[in-house]
Every structure is written in C-alpha cells, then in structure tokens.
Amino acid sequence: MEVNMTQPQVGEMAPDFVLPASNGENVSLSDYRGRNVVIYFYPRDMTPTCTQQSCDFRDANAEMLKHNTVILGISTDTVKSHQRFIEKKELPFLLLSDTERTVCEQYGVWQLKKLYGKEYMGIVRSTFLIDAAGKLVREWRKVKIKGHTQQVLEAVEQLQAETVN
C-alpha cells in the first residue's frame, strides 16, 4: 500500500480539505479562516483511549473557544458512528469522517502500526494547531493522552497572546 509521506510542515499552510461532518454537512478547513483550529486525528470512536482523548478535548472546549479556537476530530469512522459517539459522550464539537483516508494521508497520520506482533495500517494519534490564517503552527505526533490536552491548550493560549500583541 502506497502512503503519501508528504505532510504539512510547521510554518506552511495546512492542507485544505472537505469532509462529511457529524452535523450532516460537509466541512472544509477553510470554513474556519479567522479562527484557530485544533484538529485531532484518532483511531476509533468508542474505544477507551479515543474516548478519553475526546472527553479531554470536550472538557477543554469552552477554554479553547475563549481563545478563538475550534476543535475538530477526524477518524475513518462513519458519520453515523460519529453521531452516536457525540451523543453518548456529549461532545460539543464536530467529528469529521475520513472513510477514504484522504485527509489522514494528507497529514501523514495513516501509517503502518503494530499491535500484539501484527502489522496493520491505521491512524497514528496526532494533533495539529492551525492559526487563523490557515498556517500549521504546532503538531503533536504519536500522542500520549495523559496531559496532552493541557499541552494543546497552552499552545493555543500562547498563539492567541502572540496574535494580540
């Protein structure tokens, strides 16, 4: 399987995309110009670690919004699965469905993984911070959940402080 290894670099414009969202609409990254965007890629709805990650972002959402920042979650799950996940966990932000893995590949998060000695292709948990102009300003790859949302929030606060000054 051929994987696109060209991925956005910090300081470059983040690749724009259009994906179906949990609200039933198609959403593009450029829809959010003028606001910062946190995009987190996660492997699967309803799994323990992904649920923890999504709930951590849920709990930080109000603070993110205070800093002109929107959160978007992306996985290869269907819109219907996302809708159930949002309902069950009361997630206040959109989840985007990348069933074709196009955006996952654009951002370099669709990679070979290993679990219990088996190799398979899947999403490597990653988060990207994109500024109001659409530029990638921070990235976190191979994310460990503990403390991650706090790191992202601190980066958002720092970005907002730089924007104001």
Image: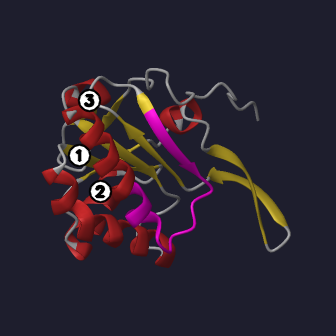
User: Tag on residue 80?
Assistant: 2
User: Tag on residue 132?
Assistant: 3
Residue at the outermost front position = 165
Hey, which quadrant is residue 81 in on the image?
bottom left
Q: Which residue is mark 1?
A: 70
Position of residue 22 in the picture relative to residue 55 (left or right): left
Q: Which residues are magenta?
A: 137-152
Residue 114 is situated, as x and y percent measured from the top left of the image, at: 78, 62
Report the front residue among 71 and 131.
131
C-alpha distance separating marks 1 and 3:
10 Å
From the viewer's perspective, is the residue at label 3 or at label 2 nearer? Answer: 3
Instruction: Report the residue at 36% width, 57% height from top.
Output: 154
- Image height check: is 88 above or below 112? below
Label 2 near label 3: C-beta < 8 Å?
Answer: no
**Of marks 3 and 2, which one's residue comes earlier in the chain?**
2
Residue 59 is situated, as x and y percent measured from the top left of the image, at: 25, 71
